[in-house]
Amino acid sequence: MADKQTYTPSHPHLLTVEFGDGDYSAFLKAAKPFKSGDIVARITGTRTRIKSYLTLQCGRPSDHLILDSDLKYCNHSCNPNTVWDISAADMSEWHVRAIRDIHTNEKITFFYPSTEWEMDQPFECQCGSEEYNCYPRPNFARTDEVLSANPEHIPTSYSSGLTTASLAQEIFDWEDSRTRDHYRTLDYTHLALIMSIASVARIAYISSDVVVDSQPPRPANSHFADTYQRLTRSRGPYEPTVVNVPLGADPGTTLLSHRSSRLQSFTASSSSQVLNRLILHLSELASTPLVLHISVEDDLSQVLVLRSLVPFFLYSRNTQEAHDHALLAARLARVEGKAVLHAFQATTSNRISEASGDDIRQFLLSEKPSAAKTHGHANGHINGDANGQVNGTSSVPEPSPADALLAAYESALASTVSFLRRPLRPVSHHGPAECENLVLAVGSIPDLAVEGVSFAHLSLLSPLPVKAILSVITPSVNRILLVEQLRQWQTKWTPLYLELLSVLQNQDNASLNLHSCFVSNGDAVTAVDVLKLVRDASSSPSSQRLTIEHPAKPTQVASPHIPKHESAYVKLLDQLFGSRLDISNSPSLVPSEGDLATTPEFAIGRVRGQLDAREELIASVTELISDLNITSELHALLSQWLQAKDDPVKGPQLGDEIVSLLMSEQYVKGAASRVLILREHFAVQSRWIIGSDAWSYDLGASGLHHAIASGLNVNILVLDTTPYSSRNAADPNRRKQDVGLYAMNHGDVYVASIAVYSSYSQVLQALAEADKFDGPSVVLAYLPYQSEDAPALDILKETKLAVDAGYWPLYRWNPSKESEGKDPFVLDSDTIKNELQRFLDRQNHLSQLVRSQPQLAAELVSNLGDTLKEARRRRAEQSYAELLTAIDAPPVKVLYASDSGKAEKFARRLATRAKMRGLSADACAMDSVSIEEIVKEQFVVFFTSVAGQGEFPQNGRTLYKSFNAAIARSEKPFGEVQFSVFGLGDSHYWPRPEDAHYYNKSSKDLNKRIEQLGGKRIVDLGLGDDQDADGPETGYKAWEPLIWKALGVDAIELTEAEPEPITNEHIKVASQYLRGTIKEGLEDATTGGLAPSDTQLTKFHGIYQQDDRDIRDERQVQGVEPAYSFMIRVRMPGGVCTPSQWLLIDQISDEHGNGTFKITTRQTFQFHGVIKRHLKSAIQDINRALLDTLAACGDVNRNVIVSAIPSMSKTHAQAYAFAKKVSNHLLPRTTAYHEIWLDKKLVAGDAVKDVEPLYGEFYLPRKFKVAVVVPPNNDVDVFANDLGFISIVNDSGDVVGFNVTAGGGMGVTHGNKKTYPRLGTVLGYCPIEQAIDVAEKVMLVQRDNGNREDRKNARLKYTIDRMGLDVFKAEVERRLGYTLQPPQPYTFDRNVDDFGWSTGADGKHHFTTFIENGRIQDEPGLSFKTGLRELAKVHKGRFRMTANQHLVITEVATEDVPAVKELLAKYKLDNLAYSGLRLSSSACVAFPTCGLAMAESERYLPLLIDKVEKICEKNGLRHDSIVMRMTGCPNGCARPYVAEIAFVGKAPGAYSMLLGGGYHGQRLNKIYRDSVTEPEILAILDPMIKHYALERQEGEHFGDFVIRAGYISATHEGKEWWDRAGGEGQWREAASA
Ligand code: SF4
């Protein structure tokens, strides 16, 4: 260790605390919250000192801790209480090591003062330990975080900013990629280089609203990006939008798209590929607040090209200057509203003092942007100004533009200097005042002491600081050497030289000689170089340019790195073409040709030269053949070569023979000599240009179009390495062009899309075809990877997913096939595209195919009868054709947010109609796009429905939230976006006046937000109201024409008919009797879901696709698909099963489902949470239990339900037998179920011969429900079913016939008065022998007369009301061939279950147990599932489900009763000590699995009952049965519309409250309150139940009472259900009055 060392800060992020003499009590306070193990900062003296306590563990490395202490240096403590004094330490590399060596578990906070620190004593350890044995990583607490958590401790002098911890993180991030040993030999020069750029990046980040960062070729990150990422991670108060522009993309376009920001910064390393792109746009950008920070290594050639295009050009030659100029540039750009180019040297600097972030912001905001901007040229050009007033001495009152710019610079400079308290000058001068030579330096030329020479460094290059320059030209100077750091300047004189010359000439100083001198490496210039330069200048005319040569830095000649994965394709090319392979832009050319050697332009030039040479060879060979003096052997060889010149094998062989003959026979003149010179072209080459997908951002600018349009025989391989999951990170503001489509549009170009990890053979085929094709070929190759370390398996998976889903279609387009009469297009990826929709939602950035044809995904699988493969191929080809023609059409983006699908339908219809008008349109969910993607659109039309109380529909919430966040940040990204919004809502959904603002709230909010984000509204908000005569169509019809008008296509006449939207009817008929593509979808392991059309079909198989709605948002944020699972419903007529079946059901729920199962209101089991992988085995296991799931859902007859009257066992047996017969009779006949789930073979191979004698290929318009009831217990709610059979029993207890009811149904749509619940009407009586026939004919009349246009109006109840009951009945009877008899008398007295033990007519015993809402599960303290399993093991009778979701253990022999009782007691299954209210309650599933749920039901009703029970109890009604039901939506699965009290979900926590249903299901209830929350429910029920308790009549049920008491009017039939809703008289809801 050195005796005396001075450590100076070498990192820009270090100064966080400024100390001075004075009171440090604030810091003492700040120390308090620190715990043992922390470093506690404490000031101990009046000098700048911090005393720290370190509690460190023994034996840990610390030989690099730098400690200044009055107590001697200690690098290592064995005493946990040792007190260490750390003096004013600044961060140096020593500390970097120190931080690195701190133990993992310790939290450390450093405070750094700004003063310099000197260590003047040797470094010693008190304990003498030399151990250095661990390299753990510490946890760092940020100083500012600790302090901000304790604001009272923040000292006044504390300034937040990046701290040691940030630096440490950086070091460790950096270290991550290196080995420890590498770290130990760390070259701090490299670190300093990062720091120099990091300092500028930090200012850019803190000062700007938008930072645009140019990226190097993937997978590398720009040096600037490292800092941005770190700052973003640190979540500081500044959060600019950071936009990454990939190499090859045009950054100018991105900058223009953000020009409205208050300040934007562009950061890049100097490279012609990046800077040349800016030239086109700088004239437009010059008058915007923009700072271009360009880091330069040695050559200023590229950046100086831009000098004349920007109003201000600053140059920094060291890190401190870079920091200070970055601030000055920000201030200047912000205040003047003009572009400032700041070029800075990325040289090693080891000292820097930085301003804190808050101070910077304050400094920048302290002066408002100038209202009257510095006048001058709009484009900022100042050089060569017409009036030539550049010397600052003009007497013209109006300053010249250059003077005005100079004045602006000086003003900003003055502010910056006063802020920084450091000198900052446009020209800095050093050296003797009296000397003859002045070196005016532009570059990193060091300050040298040279006799007779003074130096002036130019920091302001534009506008030229004439006055300052003249001030350093002392009278003794007679020679000025303008030394510019230029390596690749093309013209003799630089603009700066000419401008300076003009200035000097204006000075009339004839004796001054101005010499131009180029230096290739400014840092390397020595005093000797300068002396030599002076000597050369004295002996040369000033018109001669001088140079100081230094070898180029090694980095200039290094070949670009080729990521290892990408070399896969190069190896393939090598393997295929061997020595013929010529990569025309090979990175190996860079050292000799410069970095332009990898561009397409360079490659095309090279190819053109090679092809010309070969042509010349051919011409020379032809000429030589005609030479009569050559030998016959040579003649023969030449002729053979001409014949076989394109043969890759024979061509070079013959060439070799020709060459050796020519040489042996000494042909050296004329054509022969040319042939020898050109001999390398005998072999036909396979010429390839290889590029990245970055080229596809700007086809024109990247030079790719030159290659495509060149017509040359060259092959272009474009590698797309961006996985779709990170597509936005590359450049969210820019859209990649589809190079394939672009090339195909050119006509004579071979195009192929390949993926080596998907189809190796297709890759080989495509590469060979491309090579063979005589003309340009474009091969797009997919190779998605995140980093070089990405395992091949990840790439394989990603590729497979992309190809299988159509994200990356594999195809080949070979125009030469056309001449052979063959189809030029071959789609090679013909796997099923079940997932296409998923990828569409993720915004395929390359394939415009799917972007413009989103219905491809949804509709492809419902192929309307064709084979799937053919349909897909046809559709894909058609899509390509459409795309090619629509490539120029104005694009319209249609976005929707829709829960029920209604807004989506409107959106898709608009997109279809837009396409018919020649626009390029696509529709997708709002959440499938980001703000950045919308910014790229010109016209965007939004459709949104409204969820709950004005909330956004689920699939639009994320985007909407990001709108709000952007508004909070005062962003206005939609400056170029034109938009309109259409909303769908129901003005009566929330009828109370105070809730009126919920109507169409989402669309109104959205409309406002987009405008706040800068969007230009082209058509006012359109509102569709369910209450209008034609529903939302009424508003829509008025709004749509305005859209066409705004888009300028209103005059277009549509000649073709609008395609019919795909409906369930189409899906059914195209499904080949319920097959669809379910089988293929089950095999698709890439998604947990099925294709949308298949999810409609699986319902017929008893399977519903669902997703866990509790985690839907979370998964969406994660960018993964919903957590799909399936609900399986068993078909079990009458709900009867054996104990062995029960055991199997129990086992299936464990093995395939979520461990529970549910008894449903249709008397069967359903399982939830079955994932796709288990679906088939679950159905097979159900089949093993001799059960099935066919027709448990879907537009068919559903599970037939039967009264579960335990005491009437004989009657029940007959009713049950009849129910089974009905179920079997009305069962679909398709063999698809067995084929798909049970692996039964198709009838006669592939030829589907299914017929559906009852259903036909359309099946029913809607579901069809049948119930069989045995009075007096209407436990099945027979009137709530489409078809009901009321058993008529003779005196012997035999069922002799049925009263037939028809037209019951529960489903309603909130607010839609065309929908209503209805009770079945008794049609008449039929004897039992006719009943099956009656069931069939009723169903057939519905099949043929039901409304297939509108599913909301398709149930039998509407058919009957539309046809009229008499007509309907007559039609049934016509089909029967006889009339129904008059109904028989019957009586119902209840619809709740009879709980407890009963004995049947057969002497067997039955126990009805209470299962709350039918959920069979084990809960803490209630092991129902286990109990029933144990019971099933011993039970010899059966189990019978009830339609109220409870369970009857039936047919227990007398001798078995004790055992059963014991088990029931053990598992508390015999507990019936519930309130009458609870025993009479019922709820549907709703959240989290039901996709239609608007509010909780099964999970909430028990909690609500807890509270209502208390009301009942205090009014003495504990045992009184009141039927209370709840559903999560108005579909009404738990039959709420016949309950005495019902709650139907409207929004989370809000329900419609209905009253007045008949106790035994004989009367509908009615809406009493439109929307109530729990407190309102309790507030309503409390007095009402009390009123009932006090004033009810004998035997009067609650439903009857509320009508008699005048709370609600009675509903006599479905059609009048909406009438008089809202209560009666004094209890009428105010809004309903
Ligand atoms: S009533 Fe609605 S929420 Fe409840 S299960 Fe049926 S569809 Fe789902």
Image (spheres, grey):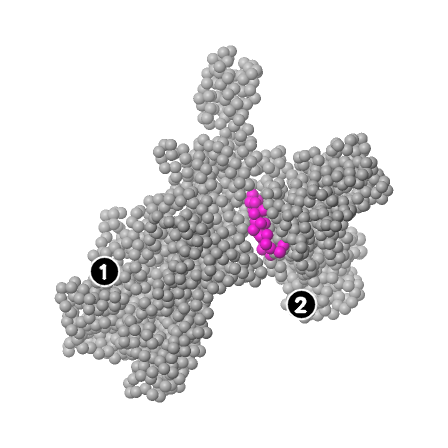
The residue lying furthest to the front in this view is 397
Q: Residue at x 80, y 30 (%)?
A: 539
Label 2 CB sits under 8 Å from any ligand 1 atom: no
* Percent position of residue 1478, x then y: 35, 78
Residue 1019 or 797: which is nearer the viewer? 1019
User: Magenta includes 246?
Assistant: yes
* Percent position of residue 40, x then y: 70, 65
Amino acid tagged 1 = Asp
Residue 1340 or 1496: which is nearer the viewer? 1340
Q: Is residue 1430 visible?
A: no
Q: Quadrant of residue 1313?
A: bottom left
The stretch of residues the image draws in magenta is 240-263
- From the viewer's perspective, tell me whether residue 265 is left or right of residue 1223: right
State which tag comes first along the sequence, 2 or 1: 2
Amino acid tagged 2 = Phe
- From the viewer's perspective, tell me whether residue 1449 is left or right of residue 114: left
Q: Considering only vertical position in the picture, is 1484 above or below 368? A: below
Q: Residue at x 74, y 44 (%)?
A: 390
Crowding at dot 2, Cα within 10 Å, few <14 / some 14-19 / many 20+, comes out as: some
* Percent position of residue 889, x then y: 45, 46
Residue 1344's disc is 1
Q: Is residue 1381 visible?
A: yes
Looking at the rendered structure, the secondary structure element under dot 2 is loop
